Image (cartoon, helix red, strand yellow):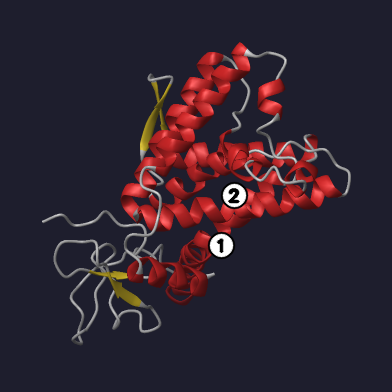
Amino acid sequence: MKSFDRAVERFCYKHPKFGIPRLMLIIVAGQAIMYVLSLIDPSGQLLNLLVFDAQSILQGQIWRLVTFVFFPFYGSVLSTVLSLYFYYFVGTTLEAQWGSGRFTIYYGMAVLLSIIYGFIVQLFGYGELITTHYINLSLFFAFATMWPDFQVLIFFIIPVKMKWLAYIDAFYFVLEMILGRTLLPLIAIANFALFFGYVLWNRLAAKLNFKKRQSDFKRATGNGPIHVNFRKEEKPYRHKCAVCGRTDVSDPNLEFRYCSRCVGYHCFCEDHINSHVHFTE
């Protein structure tokens, strides 16, 4: 997973103009238009020409490979408007942080996996509706990984941290796979893991390692929890993360990289190279 992330980063660095600018705005606008069409045409004859259908695609209706991306998730008008607003907010924030190239690859990879899944299930006789509903929801996982304590206002009133929305999302995905008998949520999670799996694993490993050292210290000394006193490195270091402060001396196995999008010369560890707020001055 780390090698894949490096490949994406190198590709975006070498091709700075790659990507679809304001991709999430295009997707949200398309889904809004198709939702309105569903209200105007309750019979669904028009939308039936736009949904993903493996047999029709093989017969030459290749536009369905694109138009299914805009197929809306049916709900009340209020729930649809709120959903599209959150998709837009989360998607545009991720694009602003990553750049259009990386966000396009992230979303495009999820769409590609969904297309492959759609061909497999439909050609084997299972008429499942293929949409990007779970891809849009999986954007909350990416956002929560980068900014877990960021607060949003549910119904513009109730403040909720993004990490709790991600937990609710995960629970919903599990229910959908069990009750809805679909693996589309798993496709969206697999795409998220492809980009963020190593980040979550490193965080978990660091937390478990700290707890182990704390437990070993307590058993050895009979004292309470470790109180960490931060002090300057005794040896000179070459690289220091601008977010967490770790260096190549304090953690020799940690990899460091420099961000080309930050103003100035700023170094970040592998855990924060893709999840930091860019320096602007």
> In the image as oriented, which residue stretches furthest toward the left?
281
Other residues around mark 1 within 10 Å, as few (<14) / some (14–19) / many (≥20): some
Q: Which residue is mark 1?
A: 194
Can residue 132 be spotted in the picture? Answer: no
Query: Residue 18's spot in the image, x, y percent?
Result: 38, 59
Q: Quadrant of the N terminus?
A: bottom right
Dot label at residue 66 = none
Query: Residue 163's spot in the image, x, y percent?
Result: 47, 42
Q: Residue drawn 38% across and 35% down?
A: 89
Q: Quadrant of the C terminus?
A: bottom left
The answer to which of 84 and 140 lies nearer the viewer is 84
Can residue 35 be spotted in the picture? Answer: yes
Tag 2: amino acid: Val
Foreground disc of the pair 1, 2: 2
**Where 278 falls versus 93 (above or below)?**
below
**Where 219 falls versus 47 (above or below)?**
below
Q: Residue drawn 41% across and 70% down?
A: 11
> In the image as oriented, which residue stretches furthest toward the front?
60
Tag 1: amino acid: Leu
Q: Which residue is mark 2?
A: 111
Query: Residue 188's spot in the image, x, y percent?
Result: 61, 49
The answer to which of 102 and 93 lies nearer the viewer is 102
